[in-house]
Image (cartoon, rainbow, N blue to C red):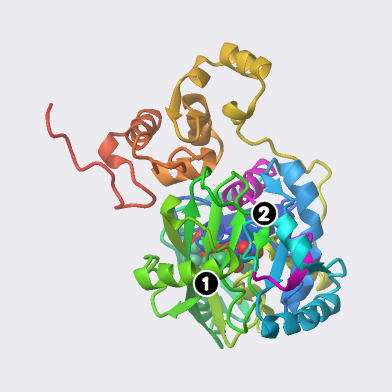
Amino acid sequence: MIKTDVLIIGAGAVGSAIAREFSKYNVSVLVVDKNEDIGGDASKSNSAIIHTGYDATPDTLESQLVVAANPMYEKLCKDLDVPYKKVGAILPAFTDEQFEKLPSIKEKAFKNRVYDVEYLSKEELLKMEPNLNPEVKGGLYIPRENIIDPFVYVQALCENAYANGVKFMLNTKVTDIIVNNGKIEKVITTAGEIEANYVVNSAGLYCDEIAEMVGKADYKVVARKGQFYILDKNTSCKVNHIVLPIPTKITKGKLMCPTVHGNMLVGPTAEDQLSKTDKSTTTAGLDSIATDVRNLIPNVNLRETITQYSGLRPNRNPEGLHFDIFDDIKGYVNLSGVRSTGLTLSIAMGKYVVQQLLMRGANFKLKDDFIKTRKGIIKFSEQTSEVKEELLKQNPLYGNVICRCETVTEAEILQAIHRPLGAKSVDAVKRRVRAGMGRCQGGFCGPKVIEILARELGVSTDKINKHQDGSYMVVGKTRD
Ligand SMILES: Cc1cc2nc3c(=O)[nH]c(=O)nc-3n(C[C@H](O)[C@H](O)[C@H](O)COP(=O)(O)OP(=O)(O)OC[C@H]3O[C@@H](n4cnc5c(N)ncnc54)[C@H](O)[C@@H]3O)c2cc1C
């Protein structure tokens, strides 16, 4: 039996942020995840926006946490070496009906204490975004809606938590939880049984299944699919800000925005579905994005798409973000409804969970040797000539470019594999150093990445997966 003070189920943005927060205290922490890599499910397939909470429902836990989280990112991303860009968002109105909604949106922002939302004239909007539909009548500016690298964000949280003593068990699925005398007796996983004083359910899409294991499933999670296009960095029609449509009750709508790496992101859809695993993109979904986004940016060039993907939002029914603890199951924390703003609110949720437990009498003592910062993998192509020369002297593998589109060197890929919680699959390498994220989508570097992974992990190439067990890339040799 494995023993730990705190067990966190799920290594997505939320579980990882909670783990990092706990790692400031003198408690043993274990994170388990059914996936082969840290990074979560929804957390690696979203719009990558750090929201302000301007449009959240006022006086809800979600608005409280998003509004609190937004100002934390600038320092956090510096401390943890995470790519983060301040771009701001615009919300243009094209019809009289949309224009008339602007005051109520500003009022809602005000109720959420997002006071820096301002009106923009047609001229100001077209100056800020020359590719905007010239039919625009006016709009709003939301200056603190910013963008982040969502993969590196979660990796950084996990690596920093790990450096502070948190343990991780990947490929480990929680299959049952035994409750006895108002307390969790043990958590049963595919990798053995775990005894913990505190169990945090941050299992995203599957949080209802975990809640069911302890008899607290008074809700269901329905997957709400969001499909996207990613456009080439050199696309002819770009935007400088996050260009948002006027939101509806169901969704924030389909937007266009830059990514921190200079691509353009277009989407997402919002489609409820029964399957929690179907992440296919569909013609209907992608066509609906094309139609809607052309209302915002008429010349968007979707022919310059380099890939399409979809993510599944954990949509709670009944809706709403919930933090639940129960008198009859001591130490169990249930998080649910982390739907469309979970990337943003994750860092505040980490603090909220730990503080709530402290206020209820938990005896966590702050460590005096908490390591606050983490250094990421150096991106060779972004260094000055002097730094590049120095790096090449230290490691000649910086001279071997494996991914030509994103200029990723072998030295960077080796770090992605050999860092703590390192990459074991092709996609895990891609999420760490961007090999395969460029316009050829791994067509050129894919086989080389497989070979490097096989060599470094000491296995044959047919054992290297795309992302999880069974998603093999090589079936065998055609010749000796
Ligand atoms: C299309 C789309 C766009 C979005 N855009 C934004 C945005 O711009 N900004 C923003 O702030 N948010 C956005 N979100 C929301 C955000 O991505 C999610 O709210 C957030 O990632 C949820 O994080 P999580 O850690 O709760 O869940 P996840 O990332 O899903 O992680 C849950 C983890 O739990 C693990 N798990 C589940 N069951 C078990 C089990 N039985 N045993 C072990 N492990 C288990 C899973 O493997 C997974 O790794 C978007 C979401 C989508 C889908």
Could you tell whether 230 is left or right of 149 in the image? left
- Disc 1 within 8 angstroms of ligand 1 (CB): no
The magenta region covers 135-164
Tag 1 residue: 292
Q: Amino acid at mark 2?
A: Ile
Q: Circle 2 sits in a helix, a strand or a loop, which is it?
A: strand
Q: Could you say which is closer to the camera, residue 92 or residue 253?
A: 92
The spot of residue 238 in percent (x, y) is 59, 51
Query: Disc 1 versus disc 2: distance between alpha carbons?
Result: 22 Å
Q: Is residue 311 above or below residue 391?
A: below
The answer to whether residue 318 is visible is yes
Q: Quadrant of the C terminus?
A: top left
Tag 2 residue: 147
Quarter-wise, where is residue 64 in the image? bottom right
Quarter-wise, where is residue 296 in the image? bottom right
The spot of residue 150 in percent (x, y) is 60, 53
Would you say residue 146 sits in the magenta stretch? yes
Residue under the point 77% across and 63% down: 123
Residue lying at the far left of the rendered structure? 479
Could you tell whether 114 is left or right of 452 in the image? right
* Chain-order first, disc 1 or disc 2: 2
